[in-house]
Amino acid sequence: MTFRLSLQKRFTIWVAALVIFLVGAILWVIEKREVNTIFDEYTNRGLLFTRSMAELNLRSLLVWDVDALQSSVDEQIDENRLYIIIYDRYATPIVYNRQIASDRAIYSQSQLQGEIVPKSAYIQAKEVLLDKTLRRVLEIEIPIFDRSSGSRWGSVKLGLSLAGLPAEIRKIRLVLILLGAAGLLLGILGATVLARRITRPLKRLSEGTVRIARGDFAHKIDIDSTDEIGHLARRFNEMSEKLRLTLEEIEATNKKLVQSEKLAQVGRMAATIAHEIRNPLTSVKLNIQKIQTSPHLDETEREHAALSGEGIVQIERFIKELLNFTRVSELQKAHFSIEQVLDESLKLLRGVFAEKRIAVERRYVPGLPEVVLDGDRLRQVFANVLRNAAEAVEPGGRVSISAARIDHDGACRLRVRIADNGSGIPEKDWENIFEPFFTTKPQGFGLGLANARKIVEQHKGTIRVVLKRGPGTAFEILLPCEEPR
């Protein structure tokens, strides 16, 4: 089994390793500088003290007051100043503290011999044996010059204890370790947050590609950053949107192909029906009409003959609708006012509306542009929709008709909306009602709305059922219009 780390974990590990290296290097440099600073502080302190001793004891050295020199040395000895030695001009020790009296190797030899300038100094960290104990000291020796004569009269040697140096270094190291640990924690925390900020959009991008690969082209990758990842996400969203539109176009094309195949099948069937049924049906109709004129029929026989005649009329109407649906005729287009076409469609159904006392409400936006259309075919569409509305409402119902200009997908469109307050159509059937032979009415052939959609699409428009407030159904018809000049 292969062990794999996620991109976030790998990024965190690498950044943490880099932080550890950088923090360690910085702390190492700081420690070296701090140690040197402490050592320089010891050196400066020792030089300052040694120079003050030289100035203080110059006069006693000039008059050769050994007792004063010894007293001065004894007064300055403490736990940090382990030994003080004063030499004469010949590098011979004159006085030194009694603690080193038995350690001749410490005081017997001066480090400043030969030609020495006033600013000469001997500085050396070393280990010396004091009272049988090995002690680490900073040994400093400077010459004693008489400024008036410029002559050298001797030198002063100081042995400064370095016993406190390791403790100070350890304290500095502890502080640096604490600072390093805090910096390391902050670095790892920052690396984790940074890794999450970088990898989370990548994870969302990866999840989005998986969903799009599965066919969910409506999914949008929600990344608002302005960096390369955000740019990639936006390009990916554009690609998925184009794929979605292409898929919708393919589905629409497939639907049209299926619809065309259906129409072809219906056309062949209609031709067969017209040929096989229509001619014999005409003979039957004529014979029934002739029988109805016979004086030998009683009332019951006349009623039966009338019912037969009505049935034949209904069959003829079905054949006519079927032939009209399957017939592809060229549109006779001309400039029309949409208000005029709607009003003429209403006149065709004036009797139906009056019989059921249906109130008609018309709302036309003033100044609507003219449209180029086949007036007869569009009147057929509007009349079909209005007839369905009249059949759907109860006596005393209401039908509203509105027309307005809108911008749809950047193009001018006329929107005609026909709504009623009838029983309504179930939402699951909103698309099915435009299919041939589908109907929700107890009577009818299911070809009216299918023919209406065919005519509207011939005009490069659309027809659909839309949601409305309250009961009833609303049809929306969009037709292309000319831009106003």
Image: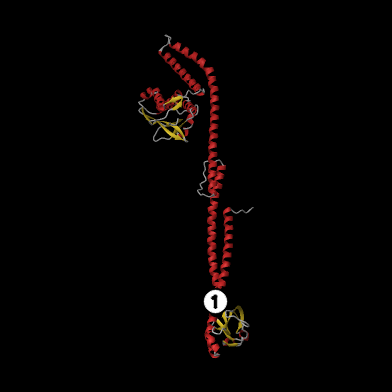
Q: Which of 302 and 169 is in front in this view?
A: 169
Q: In this view, does 468 lie above or below 103?
A: above
Amino acid on which the number 1 mark rests in the picture: Asn
Q: Name the residue under label 1.
A: 44
Q: Which of 463 and 167 is in front in this view?
A: 167
User: Where residue 210 appears, x then y in whole percent?
Assistant: 56, 45
Q: Which residue lies furthest to the right in this view?
A: 1
Residue 216 is at least partly visible in this image: no
Q: Which of 197 and 27 is in front in this view?
A: 27
Residue 451 is at least partly visible in this image: yes
Q: Residue furthest front?
A: 149
Picture quadrant where residue 310 is located: top left
Q: In this view, does 286 lie above or below 9?
A: above
Picture quadrant where residue 247 is located: top right
Q: Nearer the viewer, residue 104 or 304?
A: 104
User: Where residue 17 appears, x then y in whole percent?
Assistant: 59, 60
The quarter of the picture where the C terminus appears is top left
User: Where residue 11 appears, x then y in whole percent?
Assistant: 58, 55
Q: In this view, does 361 lie above or below 30?
A: above
Badge 1 density bin: few <14, some 14–19, many ≥20, Cα 10 Å: few
Q: In this view, does 334 lie above or below 239?
A: above
Q: Which residue corresponds to the image point at 53% horizontal and 53% vertical from the top-left?
A: 197
